[in-house]
Amino acid sequence: MIAETVCSAVAVAGLGIAGVTAYRKRFLSAARIAAYSLLPLGLVMTGIVEWLADTAFSPTAWAGFGVLGAAWALFATTRAVERRRGGTRKERRAAARAERSDAVAAGASAPSLGQGARPAAAPRAQGGADDFSDIEAILKKHGI
């Protein structure tokens, strides 16, 4: 009963503030204030405020919130541990298989990529260490 009275008073006060705001020719703000002030009244009329009041003073409801909090804490903890370990068991097995397949042969000194896999080194100009021809080409391309 008290919650309904308070919500109704808040709605009336909000509508009064909206009226003053509309009198000052700020109609968009007045409409927004009126919308916010009508929310508590609508919640009272639909019965949500009564349901919330019954829930707030119910020990069973608070125990339910405690169970929900414990479930959330367990979920968050398991996710944190899973991320620290590097994913799920399936992902760890796949990573281990990929690591074994990429391994180098025991007698090899370097991975055998073949000659075609290495990029050819770009020939340097004989002009010295201050070769800025590629930078000049980029600047000319952009008109600088």
Image (cartoon, helix red, strand yellow):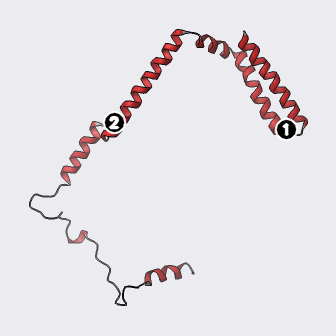
| Secondary structure found at label 2 | helix
Label annotation for residue 27: 1
Locate residue 17, reporting x and y percent.
84, 29
Local crowd size for mark 2, using a 10 Å CA cut-off: few (<14), some (14–19), many (≥20)? few
Q: Secondary structure at mark 1?
A: helix
Say what amino acid the circle numbered 2 marks.
Answer: Glu
Residue 110 located left or right of residue 107: right
Rate crowding at label 1 as few (under 14), some (14 to 19) or many (20 or more) other CA atoms within 10 Å.
some
Measured as percent of width and height from the top left, residue 76 is found at 41, 31
At horizontal 80% and vertical 29% (from top left) the residue drawn is 34
Residue 111 vs residue 81, the one in the foreground: 81
Q: In the depicted view, which residue is nearer to us: 24 or 108? A: 24
Report whether 86 appears left or right of 4. Answer: left
Image height check: is 33 above or below 53?
Answer: below
Q: Residue at x 59, y 13 (%)?
A: 56
Viewer-side label of 1, 2: 2
Residue at the spot x=40%, y=28% of the render?
75
Mark 1: amino acid: Phe
Q: Is residue 106 above or below residue 25?
A: below
Q: Which quarter of the picture shows residue 51?
A: top right
What whole-number distance in Å separates the C-alpha atoms at marks 1 and 2?
A: 54 Å
Q: Which residue is outermost to the left?
A: 107
The percent position of residue 144, horizontal first and vertical second, equals 57, 81
Residue 128 lies left or right of residue 12; in this view the side is left
Q: Which residue position holds label 2?
A: 82
